[in-house]
Amino acid sequence: MITTLGASLAHQELPTTAAGYRQLLAWARSFGVVRRAGVECTGSYGVALTRPCAGRTST
């Protein structure tokens, strides 16, 4: 988690599973409103995380 100025705010490691993605979103939201999230490889590996971040369910 970084601030809008790029300063490190917190760090968390979670499993790359549906449950881990839900935990990640809950953790990020514990800091306030999440306005942006950066996810790499959204066309392949990152798509599983991108969907819940965008408020979509997996297909």
Image: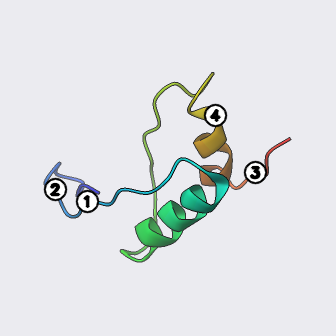
Tell me which amino acid carries mark 4. Val
Tell me which amino acid carries mark 3. Arg
Return the mark for residue 57: none
Whether 33 is drawn above or below 52: the answer is below
Name the spot of residue 27 as percent of width and height, x first.
43, 70
* Secondary structure of residue under mark 2: loop
The colouring scheme, among rainbow, by chain, secondary structure or one colour, is rainbow
Q: Nearer the viewer, mark 3 or mark 4?
A: 4
Identify the residue under disc 2. Answer: 8
The quadrant of the picture occupied by the N terminus is bottom left
Tell me which amino acid carries mark 1. His
Identify the residue under disc 3. Answer: 56
Cα distance, mark 2 to mark 3? Answer: 28 Å
Local packing at callout 4 (Cα closer than 10 Å; few below 14, some 14-19, many 20+) is some
- Going from the N terminus, do you reach mark 2 or mark 3 first? 2
**Decide: marks 2, 1 in contact (CB < 8 A)?**
yes
Q: Is residue 15 left or right of residue 17?
A: left
Name the spot of residue 47 as percent of width and height, x first.
64, 34
Local packing at callout 1 (Cα closer than 10 Å; few below 14, some 14-19, many 20+) is few
The picture quadrant where one finds residue 46 is top right
**Decide: marks 1, 3 in contact (CB < 8 A)?**
no
Whether 37 is drawn above or below 22: the answer is above
Q: Is residue 56 left or right of residue 29?
A: right
- Going from the N terminus, do you reach mark 1 or mark 3 first? 1
- Going from the N terminus, do you reach mark 1 or mark 4 first? 1
The picture quadrant where one finds residue 4 is bottom left
Tell me which amino acid carries mark 2. Ser
Residue found farthest to the right: 59
Cα distance, mark 3 to mark 4? Answer: 11 Å
Identify the residue under disc 1. Answer: 11
